[in-house]
Structure formats: C-alpha cells, structure tokens
Image (spheres, helix red, strand yellow):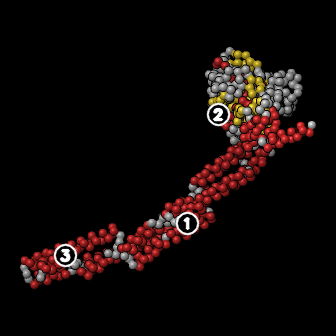
Amino acid sequence: MRKILVCGIVLLVILTLQPLSLKEAFASNLESNVIVKYMSEPSKQIIIENAESVIEEFEHLPLINIKMTNERLQFLKDQGHIEFYEENQTFTIQHQFKVANLSSVELERWNIKAMNIHNSWNEGYTGKGVKIAIIDSGVANHPDLTLAGGVSFIGDSYDDDHGHGTHVAGIIAAKHNGVGVAGIAPNAEVYAVKAIKKDGLGEVGTVLQAIDWAIENKMDIINLSFGDLEYAPSLHEGIKKAAEHGIIIVAASGNEGNDSGTGNTINYPARHEEAISVAAVNRHFKRSSFSGTGDANDFAAPGEEIYSTYLNGQYATYNGTSMATPHIAGLLALLMEQYPYAEAAELRDGLRYIAEDLGEAGFDALYGHGFPKFQSPNGQIVDELLNSGLSSEALHEKIEKMPSTIEKLALKNEWNKTQQTVIQEIDQILADFMKNPTEQRHTQLTELLAKMASADVKVEKQKEIDAAISALLEPAANAVNIFSKNKTVYNYKKADAELEKLPALKAKQELESALNEALQEFAEKAIQSLAQYEKQPTKDHYNYANFSINNLPDSSIKSDLLEKLNKKVQAAVKQATTNIAAYEKVQTLKNYNSAAKTIQLIFDEKQREQLEKRIKKTVDNNLAKAKLRAANYEKKKTKANHELAMKLVRELPNGKDKEQLLKRLK
C-alpha cells in the first residue's frame, strides 16, 4: 500500500511539473468533442497545445471547440486554465407546417393586422438600415425575399434545404409588393446565417460560430427560433457576448408547453436574461397550448397559422414559437429605425410600453409583459418637453421619472440624439484638432464638454483631449530638442512645423522660446557677418553676409537681418543715385568719380548694373560731344576751337578714349 501511495505521489509531481505533456500522459483516454471556456490567453494556448484537435477558435468569444480526453480536461480545469467545459450539445427546431397555395391578399394576414404594422408602414418605418442575423437553417431563394448576405457553418451554401429559416425570414422581411406575404420590416437587411442542418438538428458549437460572425459583422438583431430545455453554459457565454456588443437577441420560448400552462418549460437560450423570450398566441390572442411558460417569458406574439415564404418559391403555414420570435425581431427593427439613438435596453423597454396586457393583470408566466403592437408617441407631449428650456441634466432627470409610455422612449431617443450629437462634435473637432490644432478648436472642445450630461462620458472625453494634447506636444518637444543639438535648416523647419500644429498653449510658448534661443545661436555667424559688412562695406563682406543670412531658416530673425542688409544696400543705392544725378546735372570729372565710387559700393548685381547703364549714358553723350569738338579743331585749328575741345575732354573719365582725344588735341 505504501509503495502504491509513493508511486501516486511521484506521478502527481510529474504531472504538476510538466502540464504540457498531458497529451502523452493521457493518450489512451477516449476523446470528447467539447466546448471550453478558457481563463486567459496563456491558458488558451496551453489548452490548444494539449488538445487532440482544434475544431474552432472564436474571434469574439472566450471559447474554443476542441477534442480532448475528459481526464486531461479535468486536469487543466484543476490547474486553473479552464473555467468550464461541456459536450457540444445538439438541439432540434420544432414546428408544425403545411405548404399553402399562393395568395395575393398580402395585407389581410391576421398577424400583420394584429400588431398594427400597417400604421408603421404608413408612417414610413420599414426597418430600413437595420441588420438582422437569422441563425437558422439558411434562407432559400424566393421571389418574395431579398437577402443582404449570408454565411453557412455547415456547408458551402446558406441556401435553406429545410424550410424553417426561409419561413422565419419571410415573417421578418418578405417584400411589401402586394402579393404573397409582407414581412414586418420589409426593408430590413436580413442575413441568412446557416447553423441548422437539413434534418432540423443543430449543434451549440455551430451556433456559437454564427453568433461570433454576427458580432464581427455588427448585426443589430439576432433571431434564434430554436432552443432546448438543457442549459448550455457555452451558448449562454455567446449570448452574453453578443449582448455586450449591443446586439438584441430574440429567442423562441419553445414548444415544450402543456395545455394547462404549468411549470417552467421555457427553452434555452430564451431563458437567459440577455435574450428576449417570445411566447406564441393564436389569432384570438390566447396562448398557444404548446408555448413555453415561465417567469423568463418576456412577450407574446403571433405563433399560429402564420403564412410565410417557403422552399421552391412556395408559401407555407407554420405554427410555433419559432414563428412568434421573428414577429418581435421585425417589430424591433421598426423601433430601431423610428428611434435610431435608443440603446438596446431602451428599445427592450419600448416593447413593454407598447405591449397590450394579456392574461392576468400585469406580468405573467404565460404572456410575459404582453402583446406588443406598433404605436407612435404623442408628438405634442414630446415637443412640449423638448422645448421646455430645461438643461440636458434636468431633462434627463425628468424623462427618467416619467411613467412607462412610448413618449418616454421617444424622449430618451431625442435626449440620446442630443448627447450623441455632442459626442460626435467632440470627436470630429478632436480629430480636426489632431490634424490642425488651434486655440479655437481647443475652446470649442471645452465648451462642448460642459454640455455633456454624463459625468463618465465627460471624464472619458477629457482624457482623450488631454492625451491628444500630450501626444501633440511630444513631437514638437522632440523636434525642438533635436534642433538645439544639431542646428540645421531642416531640423529648424521640422520643429517650427510641429509647433505650428499646436494651439496657443503655455507649453507651446515655452517650446517657442527654446526654439528661438537655439535659433539665435544658429544665427550668430550671420549677425556677425552683417555687422562686419556694415562696418566695412566690401564685396566680400557683402557676399558673406548675404550668404549667411539666406542660409538661415525662414524666421523673424532672418527677416530682421535681411531687412538690415537691404537697408544698407538701399542707402548705398540712394547715395549713388544722388551722385549720378549730380553728375548728370554738372558733368565734371569730380562728379563722375564721386558717382562711380558710390556705384562700386553696391554689390547687388541688378541694381549696380542699372546704375552703371545710367551713368554710362551720360559719359557716352559727353564723349560724343568731345569727339565732335576735336574734329572741329582738326578742321580749323584755332585757339577757340582747341579750348572748347579741351574743356570737354578734361571732364571725361580717365581711359583710352580720353587719352586718344588728348593726343589729337596736342
């Protein structure tokens, strides 16, 4: 006995130290197809590594569908890697039906009239823009149906080979075209999500894939017209995750009821609080004898003699809570279109506001809150409160204290719309602020935050704004630091560009001061070269000063230095212009030399060239006159002609022309 105990301890130690060797340790055990909820991502990897095979990993659900031995599963559960595991349960859809002849009296269907759907259509609400996933046996091609899309998890096609899913789809969204049957929400976007086989059987694992797809593709409503009396934790996990993503789940209460309506016979997943459980009634608003009963029932809807689309372009009449469920899904689509800013919980409450009480007064186990019928709010009541001048907080408080009426849902929708509009404005301005931060946008953000009634949302948005400012400051601070260490034009431009993105914040002013200080150091050579030029205006000093200044980045410092340089140049131009004018007026050699000397102090090529052309014109005129006088003297060598010629020649600038004329006048 002692030996056996020691061996057992050794085996336990080995298993504890080497959890990843379970595959070998339990290889001889029988495998089970199970759905596992893992405790963490590392746990998930350990489970996968020890599984015989992985059937499905879910994107949005903390579950995996695997094959693994029970011993290994239990060991991993004991080690804290698995929260729970269960066999992949099967279930079947339940219904009674008969194929019916085509009828053109589309609007006479008792179920449509009973729920006041015509009123909805007359007001323009047809479920437009609402996405509904019908997780069922698929949907067949039918002239009275238009699908927005679909997917199959039990084959390549989501085409219905059973008939159940097609019938459900017609109840929700058959075309309102005057023939056949009209769906509750004929313009809703219906998606065929095939998870039930031809024989009407389905598996929890497949339904979980379908729910995962619905979450990924952002469905608004999921219709589940099936169920089972046995609780499946993994399916409940999927339902909870879908609800967390804002999806409304509508489920059939099941056909397990009895004539007396006793006992808790509601199926799962309808029994879960996250789902809306739908019971069935007949055209006389009496509970169908098969309809599930219990405190989990939420509402009742038409479930007998329901005429809808079927296989091969036909129509059929079905009975069952499977038929009641899509009535509520379709009505929710109408409410979603009517109240687009209402939250899922508010829409669920909205069904209660428009439900006609059946059976015992108030909530009961047979009909839940009653039979919902489309109803529009009293516009006068809504408008009066909206235009009462109350603040957002006061209005919200007053709405919450209102009795449970459809007007309350309408007011909540409008209040949500206002808040959502503020949030959207904040998000848009914040996005613009990130691209082009200005003080005006920063002020707008502050003002909009003050309009937020929800303290939690206000705090969240303030954090986003603070994070945005912090993120914006960081690149600018880094760029300024880089320029301070490595002073180049490129680095300055980058720092200056980053600062330009920021609004007039104190931190920006500090960064601008640091950047200007570094720029002042960078410009020191240019400042000194300009001072040298001003002190000794030579061509070399001018060129060096001009080069140094123009190599500075565009900035106030560069502008100031260029202005000083230009003033110096313009002063020289002004002096040269004055001297040239004096020479033009009194054309003496002295005046010429004065003008020529000041022209030489101008180092701007264009301006000097213009001045040189101007003085040359006067020189050329005088030279022509001197040549003419010299020619006159050569023709008639008189003292008078000689003096006239010499007077002009002496005032000419020194050069070859003057020398030649002097030789001619000797």
Mark 1 vs mark 2: give the one in front: 1
**Residue topped by disc 1:** 485
Quadrant in which the C terminus is drawn: bottom left
Which amino acid lies under the numbered mark 2 shown in the image of this protein?
A: Lys
Cα gap from disc 1 to disc 3, whole angstroms: 59 Å
* Residue denoted by label 3: 656
Mark 3, other Cα within 10 Å: few <14 / some 14–19 / many ≥20: few
Quick one: which residue is furthest to the top in this view? 101
Which label's residue is closer to the chain start, 1 or 2? 2
Place of residue 371 in the rendered image (x, y in percent of width and height, measured from the top left): 79, 29
Q: Secondary structure at mark 3?
A: helix
Q: In this rendered view, identify the residue nearer to me: 80 or 378.
A: 80
Give how far apart the Cα atoms at labels 1 and 2 are: 61 Å
Snapshot quadrant of residue 607 = bottom left
Q: Residue furthest bottom?
A: 639
Residue 128 numbered tag: 2
Q: Is residue 85 above or below residue 486?
A: above
- The amino acid on which the numbered mark 3 sits, given as a three-letter code, is Lys
Question: In 3D space, how far apart are the residues under numbered discs 2 and 3 (Cα atoms)?
Answer: 99 Å
Q: Is 375 on the left-hand or right-hand side of 609?
A: right
Residue 483 in sight: yes
Q: Quadrant of residue 439?
A: bottom right
Residue mark closest to the camera, 2 vs 3:
3
**In the rendered image, the vertical position of residue 377 relative to residue 152, given as above or below:** below
Q: Residues within 10 Å of mark 1 (few under 14, many from 20)?
A: few
In the shown orientation, is residue 148 left or right of residue 487?
right
